[in-house]
Amino acid sequence: PTLLKVNAGELAAMGGAGRLGASSYAVTGAVDVVSCGGRQLRLANGDPMMGRVTATGCAAGAVLGACLAVEPDPLLAAASGLSFVAIAGEFAAGGAKGPGSFVPAFLDALYGLDARTLAAQLRLA
């Protein structure tokens, strides 16, 4: 695979980053870590509500796949995709009353994001 996306619990269950067998990986969490060929980025966007809602990780996987389809550098593709998802999560959480209203707000926020908003909101750790 071009990129492996896991959360911290999945990474631990697999025995850590050294045992992944992937040259490029993204570990999601409070700070997302993207690694590719010795290069690494740490991304600090997102909201705790994302961890309380089912399928945000699945959505991240789908967005990562789309980014990998148009960006040949897996590091940039993964960083872009995770940033889009995390920033959409921040916007959604700002207007959500709870997990039930978070999901449609998240989808709407993801739909409305563009490169300018991504650049303005992106926080590297």
Image (cartoon, rainbow, N blue to C red):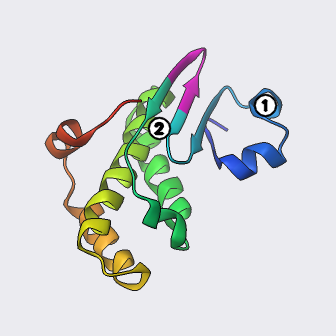
Q: Within the image, what quadrant is residue 70 found in?
A: top left
State left or right for residue 90 relative to residue 56.
Answer: left
Question: Looking at the figure, which quarter contains the N terminus?
Answer: top right
Secondary structure mainly formed by the magenta segment: strand
- Judging depth in this view, the residue of 110 and 92 nearest the camera is 92
Q: Which residue is mark 2?
A: 78
Real-space Cα separation, disc 1 to disc 2, in angstroms: 17 Å
Q: Secondary structure at mark 1?
A: loop
Callout 1 amino acid: Gly
Rendered position, 18 above or below 100: above
Question: Looking at the figure, which quarter contains the C terminus?
Answer: top left
Q: Is residue 108 magenta?
A: no
Magenta stretch bounds: 34-40
Q: Residue furthest top?
A: 38
Report x, y in % for residue 21. 78, 31
Q: Is residue 36 magenta?
A: yes
Q: Residue furthest bottom?
A: 100
- Judging depth in this view, the residue of 59 and 11 nearest the camera is 11
Q: Within the image, what quadrant is residue 92 found in?
A: bottom left
Res. 5 mark: none
- Judging depth in this view, the residue of 36 and 93 nearest the camera is 93
State left or right for residue 119 relative to residue 16.
Answer: left
Report x, y in % for residue 17. 74, 31
Q: Residue at x 25, y 61 (%)?
A: 91
Q: Which residue is mark 1?
A: 21
